[in-house]
Amino acid sequence: MYDVIIIGAGPAGCAAALALKDSGLHITIIDKHKFPRDKVCGDAIPGRAIKWLKEIDASFKDELCTFNKKILTQKTVCYYNNKQVDFDWKQEAYTSTRIDFDNFLFNVVKKKNAIDVFENTEIKDIIKDENGFTISSRNNTTVFKATMIIGADGTNGVTAKKLAGFEIDRKHHVASVRAYYKNIADTEASRCEIYFDKKYLPGYFWIFPVTNGIANVGFGMLSEDVVQKNINVKKAFYDFIERSNVLQRKFKPANIEVTLQGCGLPLGSRWINMSGDNFILTGDSASLVDPVSGAGIGNAVLSGKLAAEQTIECFKKKNFSAAFIKAYDKKLYKMIGIELKKNGWALKYFSRMPWLINLAFSMGKSNFLKKFIK
């Protein structure tokens, strides 16, 4: 029996756990995987994720210094239609493979010794009762009971579907693929690269260097366009390279280390139901990926932080009703929801009016373009 069960030990779940560690509540965090585990992603750890993790836990700054499987991101270069725009970043941001970063973050949680941890425990069912929830798993005989659930297990997890009736909407979803390459020509460890092609707007192609001379390379596009234009995302990845003289030159000496793997990104361009009686959804479970940049980790960490704060209030006031917990949705919307919806509209405009992208690049180092790739 727990006061709070966090389902999912990615950045959102770990952020919630760290924010709850001194609450005095009886808490556990459950994940279906045994860590370290991989997560198909662009591997960019944005500045806002680092900022909020430091706000959650004062010791995180020192913990981060000991984590050596990261690269400081200092510059982003964007390419479109033979134009190039460079941005220098002052905010502390990194690239790191998710297998390394998520494991590091989860180990930070484990060190606190204030939270029970269950790995390799896949949730089978969640049943609501008058006191909260009863939770069963597929590969663990333990039956869990909780007053509150914080869902952080992504769109394919059980919490979004079971608690909030989540269904994928292709208008608000990105289909993407990612591979790892070594020996890509003319790359810098601290420089991320983003490429646009009129054929695949509003999607883009990326090269994000990680450790040991390896780069995370991927392509993503709005799922609605993928279906309407009958695009094979894996073939589009290679076609994108062939259509660009810059990418052809860069990939000529490159060797693929890990083959293409796919994933879906739930966009925050629609504001879904992310809380209810005795539960809160966070991260990908709450569809918080930025529609333009594709970044999700920063918003995931923020949602975990706010979910923990709301949970503490629930126990203080002994109020676990949907109406009371809705304060979480409202605060999150005020902080990032308006921005996500605006970026959702921008995504549609970029798709319908490619000249907007061309205009942004023609303007050079504009705040307009920088805003959407941050």
Image (tube, rainbow, N blue to C red):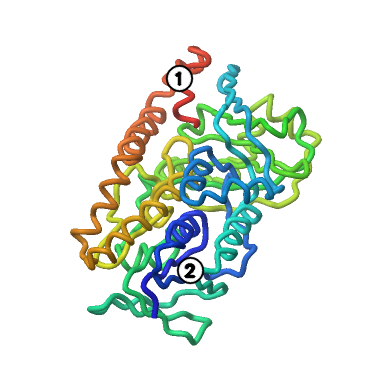
Q: Point out residue 68 in the picture as x, y percentages from the top left corner.
A: 71, 47
Query: In terms of depth relative to the viewer, which is nearer, 165 or 127?
Result: 127
Q: Is mark 1 on a helix, strand or loop?
A: helix
Mark 2 surroundings within 10 Å by alpha-carbon count, few (fewer than 14), some (14 through 19), many (20 or more): many
Q: Which residue is drawn at 42% across and 20% down?
A: 356
- Taking the view exactly as shown, the residue that stands out farthest to the top is 363
In space, the residues marked 1 and 2 are separated at their CA atoms by 40 Å
Above-or-below relation of 281 to 213: below
Q: Point out residue 338 in the picture as x, y percentages from the top left corner.
A: 30, 37
Q: Which residue is drawn at 32% across and 46% down?
A: 332
Q: Point out residue 275 in the picture as x, y percentages from the top left corner.
A: 28, 59
What label does residue 297 carry, if any?
none
**Quarter assignment of residue 254:** top right
Query: In terms of depth relative to the viewer, which is nearer, 112 or 298?
Result: 112
Q: Point out residue 93 in the picture as x, y percentages from the top left corner.
A: 58, 37
Label whose residue precedes the other's in the sequence (1 or 2):
2
**Amino acid type, label 2:** Ile
Left or right: where 96 falls relative to 146: right
**Quarter assignment of residue 151:** bottom left
**Amino acid type, label 1:** Asn
Q: Which residue position holds label 2?
A: 29
Q: Which residue position holds label 1?
A: 367
- Tell which tag, 1 or 2, sits nearer the viewer: 2
Query: In terms of depth relative to the viewer, which is nearer, 343 or 329?
Result: 329
Q: Is mark 2 on a helix, strand or loop?
A: strand
